[in-house]
Amino acid sequence: MTETLTPETAEQVLETVQWAAAEETPLEVMGAGSKRAYGRPSPAAHRLDLKALSGIELYEPMELVMSAKAATPLADIDAALAENRQRLGFEPADLGPLLGTGAGAGTICGAVICNLSGPGRIKAGAARDHILGFHAVSGRGGRFKSGGRVVKNVTGFDLSKLMAGSFGTLAVMTDVTVKVMPEPEETRTVLVLGAGDAQAVKAMSEALNSAFEISAAAHLPAGVAAVSAVASVAAAGAAVTALRVEGPEPSVVYRAEALKALLEAYGNREELDTAESLAFWRQVRDVGFFVADGPEAGQAQVWRLSVPPAEGAGVAARILDAADGRVFYDWGGGLLWLALAPRPDGGHEAVRGAIGDGGGHATLVRADADVRAAVPVFQPQPEPLARLTARVKEAFDPKGVLNPGRMYEGV
Amino acid sequence: MRMPEPDAGIIARRSDIIAGLRKIVPGEGVIVDEDELRVYECDGLSAYRQLPLIVVLPETTAQVSAILSFCLAEGVKIVPRGAGTSLAGGTLPLADGVTVGLGKFNRILDIDYENRVVVAQSGVTNLGISDAVRHRGFYYAPDPSSQIACSIGGNVSTNSGGVHSLKYGLTTNNLLGLEMVLINGEVVHLGGKHLDSEGYDLLGLMTGSEGLLGIITEVTVRILQKPECARALLIGFSSNESAGDCVAAIIGAGIIPGGMEMMDKPAIHAAEDFVHAGYPRDVEALLIVEADGPEAEVEHLIERIEAIAKESGAVNVRISRDEEERLKFWAGRKAAFPAIGRISPDYYCMDGTIPRNKLAQVLKRIGALSKEYGLGVANVFHAGDGNLHPLILYDANKPGELEAVEEMGAKILRLCVEVGGVLTGEHGVGIEKRDLMDTMFTEDDLKQQQRVKCAFDDGHLLNPGKVYPTLHRCAELGRVHVHRGQFRFPDLPRF
């Protein structure tokens, strides 16, 4: 019978994992469970629910540092940071609505373990770039820590990076220390209307190659822009290419104007103010356009591709030539979100086949559990790398008790 | 500081090993004569020297792969070496080990402006990357002070920073891809021109791994467009405390400057005597704060920083009027190390990181240690990110003085850890801080790190004796202690 174990202390997490390792009983590790459907279904016997490990343990605004227990809700963290006009620099996406688990439920270590980021990834980095240190229990049933509370640190291996994006397959994090960033004084978004995908990627590249410190660059083809949460974008009746500038007011005003001049050749230009910008980029961040699938798409399967930015439009075109669906671009063309008509095999061969020699990877973020069980959810790895991955897993979790198979079969 | 006992059996087989390596790298690429080996006997931590068994200078990834396969089969240890500028002894040779120098990996392979990346072989210098893209207004952001000489592969191995890392990040934040060779000769590609490598973030793990996990042959890094302009403020204070307060107030106001450096009085005087940068001599601490970006932003920030400085009790504020003056402000800071070299026969450069708000407290205690040991100290500090470089002045020719310096240095690093900081910010652990690792980590922490090492190199052939004070056998580390018969936690809440 499946049991849910809810330890209240790091010590109890240790005992639980030691027991699981001794019994070779797999555990499904979860915080709030908002991303349970992200990854391959785990055949774990029991559930290790960390929700009782919650609370901010340290927050020093002047030092730009915060430590929190594993399952501290991001909502609590955002609220504490907002009091000091600060934020998490990596802009973690809230994938709950996309995955059907509701908005606002995510936890700090959930964001870390999935290496979440947002549109600001191109400038500010992903979760991986913001972890300063952590405590954890390995799948072997041993407590360990890595890193510290300072930004500059090369003391020993950077295990924080390994935790980010490991989907709970290596260790159970019990707390994490992250760097935090000041909230920008002002945010504006320059829009270019009516550019085709390939032209839009060129426009974004030109902007990103300028000295105007673009903090986000996305392109919404007309059908996607039409469901924007920002009225003026939805009403544009055209594709929208968006470039975000943040910073002190005089700088933002200057850069927005300069960008409009720079991109004159690409189409008519508009501007969003701070409030509209926040709404616009939140929807891009959370893949909000694909939450409620239109009738033409049914329950669409959602893919996420990271590719060299200049190749983004070409990759998307190759996929959409062969399949029904919609795409939008983030990261200046380097991140593709695709909603494709459902297929039993997720269309994985066509999607991955579209990635060119320039490299990249594709993840099936939303699909029914049976599809995610049958299809490689994460990009399959070439042989030497796959073996190395298995050895790294073994270094932390030799009995395979933590989220086994969540990323790759047998890992 | 002890290195692992050399293996006499390997040393006895030296000529066979030379013959094997010559089959892989022909001609002058295998160095065996003592005079030539002498070039490689130390790195930037020159107090420690050791002639390597052999030096090999491969030119291709295939050769690196063959060298590692050969060494694995023969049980020969390997020390990877970039430009040899490590300040922590990370590339100190082994008497029974082959030093693999990457100096011939000096080509830039691809400059891709559309994707804003450069692909370079690992021996290309840090500055070489910026030089290659400068004509288009681009640069590579991390700028360690050794950037003229240090290699990009070495930067990856120590996660190098520089004076702009507060705003633009460290190597790890600017690295997108790697080609590396594992100890068994397998060539692995991590990441590429896209963001976030797939699977476990081995790219992040490799960064700062000090040559213990593999040999890096190729890197892909991001390049940025140069800011439109930059201006610097030179701010003098009558105490370290008020300088520290000013740093905190700037960050607290939500400003992340392009650079924020601090020097204490001995460092100010040495630098001023050397380069005549126009530094005030009557202050206890000096901050150089740089704002960069569009003119409008820089004006705005300079004004705000100046106001904050005055509120924090600055006794002296100067703002660079033009590019020439800005560079002059920096010239003193950039020449701080050689400037110290002029006033002391030798100096020992430390590299701890502390929470910014502990600065005044730490400097006070370093001052006390300086008195206790009778050794002068000058401090330069990446104030923005808390990275402290105390330079201890000494004379290596005086018997016992190096030992005293090392003892004092260890006390400074323990102090950094005690106040919530770490042993090394950007130089690496190498051999220098190896035996201090237990001040920061428990035995369990270190064992888990070494299990990761075992996943890459279970024979401990890659750079042994560096970073970890005790080498545990991988078989022993792999054992799982079974806690059988334990109660299934009657106290644990469950549903």
Image (spheres, grey):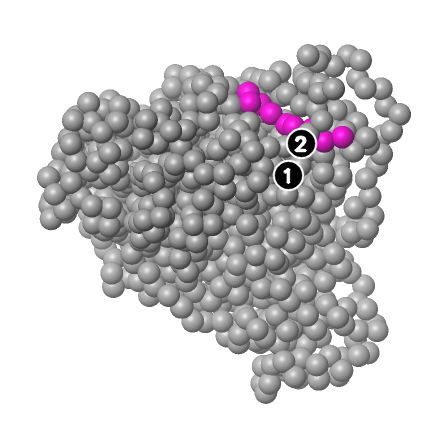
Magenta range: A25-33
How far across and how far down the image is residue A86, in percent? 38, 25
- Residue located at (71% from left, 12% from top): B493
Q: Secondary structure at mark 1?
A: loop
Residue A126: quadrant of the picture: top left
Chain ID for label 2? A
Residue B402 located left or right of residue B187: right
Residue B201 located left or right of residue B450: left
Residue type pointed to by label 2: Pro
Of the 4 image quadrants, the one containing the N terminus of chain B is: bottom right
Q: Disc count in the image?
A: 2
- Residue located at (51% from left, 47% from top): A379
How far across and how far down the image is residue B100, in percent? 61, 70
A10 magenta-colored: no
Upstream in the sequence, badge 2 or badge 1?
2
Measured in 3D between alpha carbons, the distance from the residue under mark 2 to the one under mark 1, in whole angstroms, is: 8 Å
Chain ID for label 1? A
Residue type pointed to by label 1: Gly
Residue B393 located left or right of residue A248: right
Q: Which mark is on residue A405? A: 1
A29 magenta-colored: yes
Say whether residue B253 is visible: no
Q: Residue furthest right?
A: B485
How far across and how far down the image is residue B84, in percent? 55, 66
Which residue matches tag 2? A43
Of the 4 image quadrants, the one containing the C terminus of chain B is: top right
Q: Secondary structure at mark 2?
A: loop
